[in-house]
Amino acid sequence: MQASSTGPPEIRPYTAAVPKKLDRNRPAQGARLVALRQAAGLSQAELARLVGTTQQSVAYWETSDRPPGSDYLPKLAKALGVRVEVLLGADLAQMPRKSGPAGKLRKMFDELAKLPRAEQDRILHVLDALVDKHRKKAS
């Protein structure tokens, strides 16, 4: 047999820009975290910086079937812009709600939550002024 004249394969160094391919199926918990991180437009390193941990920890959480520790869950939820329940995979549609029919105010707040953040802030400014005015009258 003839030896190959091309030599050994080129070895390129690993960088954060070239993530290692996962050689097994990603567990649901890890896949959820990856999807939330990507939806937030964050890299593993950026998310790690925001929650005060290492990129390696974020990479581990994304390949694990266990959720991150309870000390990191609130920080992750804040950085990703979701509730902790979403990080843990809770189906919010099936979570128990307060009893009783939804009033006009609750329905309006549900609709307002769908508006862009800037519009929500404007509405909150008006509501703050109205509530403050009512407090002053009550005292």
Image (tube, rainbow, N blue to C red):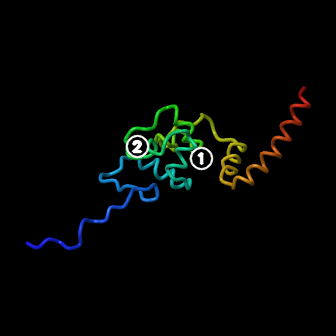
Q: Earlier in the sequence, mark 1 or mark 2?
A: 2
Tell which residue pokes out farthest to the left in this image. Answer: 1
Q: Which mark is residue 51?
A: none
Q: Which quadrant does the C terminus fall into?
A: top right
Q: How many marks?
A: 2
Using residue 82 as the reference point, say whether residue 108 is left or right of it.
right
Q: Which mark is residue 81?
A: 1
Q: CA distance from mark 1 to mark 2?
A: 21 Å
Image point 52% across, 31% down: which residue? 71
Image point 49% across, 50% down: which residue? 44
Between 121 and 130, the one lying in front of the other is 121
Using residue 139 as the reference point, say whether residue 7 is left or right of it.
left
Using residue 103 as the reference point, say whether residue 54 is left or right of it.
left
Across and down, in percent, residue 125 comes to 81, 46
Image point 23% across, 72% down: which residue? 6
Secondary element under disc 1, as helix, strand or loop, is: loop
Across and down, in percent, residue 133 comes to 89, 36
User: Disc 1, disc 2: CB below 8 Å?
Assistant: no
As shown in the figure, which amino acid type bears the numbered disc 2? Tyr
As shown in the figure, which amino acid type bears the numbered disc 1? Gly
Between 99 and 60, the one lying in front of the other is 60
Q: Which quadrant does the N terminus fall into?
A: bottom left
Density class for disc 1 (Cα within 10 Å; few <14, some 14-19, many ≥20) is: few
**In this figure, which residue is indicated by the disc labeled 2?**
60
Image point 65% across, 41% down: which residue? 102
Using residue 107 as the reference point, say whether residue 127 is left or right of it.
right
Across and down, in percent, residue 25 comes to 32, 52
Quarter residue 116 falls in: bottom right
Secondary element under disc 2, as helix, strand or loop, is: helix
Across and down, in percent, residue 73 comes to 52, 37
Between 3 and 56, the one lying in front of the other is 3
